[in-house]
Amino acid sequence: MRRTGGRSAAVLSSIRAAVEELVRERGAERVTIPLVAERAGVNPTSVYRRWGDAATLINDIATYRLDPDRPIPDTGDLRADLVAWAGEVVEHYRKPVNAALLRGGAATAGERESDCLRNRRAEATMLVDRAGPGSPVTADEVIDGVIAPIAYRAIFLPWTLDEATAGRLVDRLLPTGRSA
């Protein structure tokens, strides 16, 4: 059982900060566990013990940055909730370090679904489930129509993410008259 406070929390915080700084400075592909450990002021074996390798560490930090435990919008209107939720994701990935972490996390996911995508899928499912059995969309349609274009832009065209992106994507997914 992990303690959430004290030295463990301070070490995790310093490691997360070190990864973010190094990704910002060098790019995700040049981040190594010895560099992270040195920057964080911890022994490399502590980092290896928890994450195993730099790819897993970066994927974990990418997931951590968009807190999966944050409250999901709940206005009672699926369209409004999707726009607010997608807006949070867009705003998050407009920050260069977060886009770099996403690129690094996606690159390390390999054949498996990344933690970041798994968390967004769970959130989309929650939003769609709230709309009830008459929901005009499925969680997979939300991922394909809203999250996938945001992730694509964050990875390949980060400068194209703007304040209107979330609304445009939700409007494309839920044309007028399809909202729950």
Image (cartoon, helix red, strand yellow):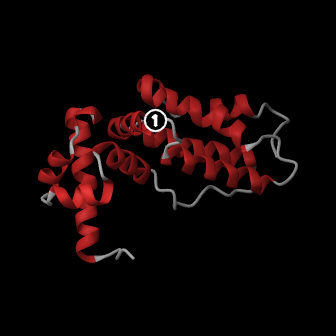
**In the drawing, does residue 98 fall left or right of residue 176?**
left
> In the rendered view, would you say 108 is above or below 49?
above
- Count of all numbered marks drawn on residues in the image: 1
> In the rendered view, would you say 52 is above or below 117?
below
Q: Residues within 10 Å of mark 1 (few under 14, many from 20)?
A: few
Q: Secondary structure at mark 1?
A: loop
Residue positioned 50% across, 36% down in the render: 111
Residue positioned 11% across, 52% down in the render: 38
Q: Quadrant of the N terminus?
A: bottom left
Q: Is residue 66 shown to the viewer in this render? A: yes
Q: Amino acid at mark 1?
A: Gly
Q: Which residue is mark 1?
A: 110
**In the drawing, does residue 118 fall left or right of residue 62?**
right
Provide residue 92's location: percent of width, then percent of height: 44, 43
Residue positioned 41% across, 54% down in the render: 64
Residue positioned 22% across, 34% down in the render: 30
Provide residue 18's location: percent of width, then percent of height: 21, 50
Q: Kindly indicate the quadrant of the structure image that contains residue 146.
A: top right
> In the rendered view, would you say 108 is above or below 46?
above
In front of the other: 47 or 25: 47
Q: Is residue 157 shown to the viewer in this render? A: no
Provide residue 127's location: percent of width, then percent of height: 70, 52
